[in-house]
Image: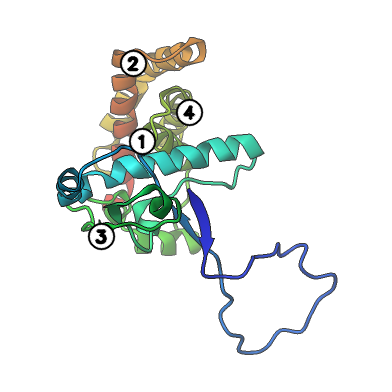
Amino acid sequence: MLAVLAAEERRSFLRSKKRARKAEPSPEPTMVPTARATVIRGVPVSELEAKSWMAVAGEHVETELAVVNRILHLHRVSVADPYVRETSLDQAMVVRVGYGIGEQVADGKWTEAVEPPAPTGRMRREAVLRPQERLAALLGGKDAALACEELTLRARADLDAGRLREAAIQLRVALDAAVAELEPWKERRDLAERIDELSRSRTTVAAAADQALRAGLTTEAAADVERVLGRIEAALRARTAGGI
């Protein structure tokens, strides 16, 4: 169940004004919509079963978020809008796990719910890449945003969402771009060895991509996609790990 909360209907910037209008020098912040997505399993449970399920609420969040992101992905395809994107826990204002009767949960309410703790023990990829220093270098023209970085991010998003065919096809392009674009930095740290390793993976990745074009991936091919994608990410981190 999807709902928009806590704001008036947002009107398109391009269609809201027929002519330029004077703006206040110190305007109040504009209210924006807040979206609420409720994933309802529709499984009858006893109160004891529900409380036991809530006791490990944190274990359910990633699974339910995947459901939301699958809907967003299908919406993007159905409306042919490339700017509809999946979401992440970092973008959530609040996450709740609970239970209730049909009328309650359909309206985003519950009989009882908890707010699970934030996931721990995972190092965010951007933390390794020293984001503030990197952004300053990019803005100042001291570093370049490589095409393979964007392609790798797209492949990672597909793989994490379970879109194995898309990930395999995207990975082939990302790998070719990474081998070519990392070449100028091959003297840095151990990048020469990493580039050689990526080059040797081309045949494996091409086979997985060809398989993805014909049908679904085998378990072995899917493992190859995940492994090589991880190696590209490691090479990109190595390029920036010592600073720009």
The one nearer the camera, 184 or 209, is 209
Which numbered tag is attached to residue 170?
4
Which of disc 1 and disc 2 is earlier in sequence?
A: 1
Amino acid type, callout 1? Asp
Looking at marks 2 and 3 on the same chain, the residue that comes earlier in the sequence is marked by 3
Q: In this orientation, which residue lies closer to the viewer: 76 or 195?
A: 76
The residue depicted at 44 percent of the width and 42 percent of the height is 69
Task: Indicate which disc, 4 or 1, sits on the residue closer to the N terminus.
Answer: 1
Placement of 3 over or under 146, stated as above or below: below
- Image: 13 above or below 78: below
| Mark-to-mark CA distance, 3 and 4 | 36 Å
Please tell me whether mark 4 or mark 1 is closer to you in this view. 1
Q: Which mark is residue 115?
A: 3
Residue drawn at the location 39% of the way across and 15% of the way down = 217
Give the label on residue 95, or none.
Answer: none
Q: Which residue is mark 1?
A: 160
The structure residue drawn at horizontal position 52% and vertical position 56%, both measured from the top left corner, is 3
Q: Earlier in the sequence, mark 2 or mark 4?
A: 4
Dividing the picture into quarters, in which one does residue 25 lie? bottom right
Q: Position of residue 143 (x, y in %)?
A: 44, 54
Distance between the Cα atoms at labels 4 and 1?
Answer: 13 Å
- Give the Cα separation between the discs numbered 2 and 3: 38 Å
Q: CA distance from mark 2 to mark 1?
A: 15 Å
Whether residue 148 is visible, yes or no, is: no
- Give the SS element for disc 3: loop
Badge 1 crowding class, 10 Å Cα cut-off, few under 14, some 14 to 19, many 20 or more, is few
User: Which circle's residue, 1 or 3, is located before the other in the chain?
Assistant: 3
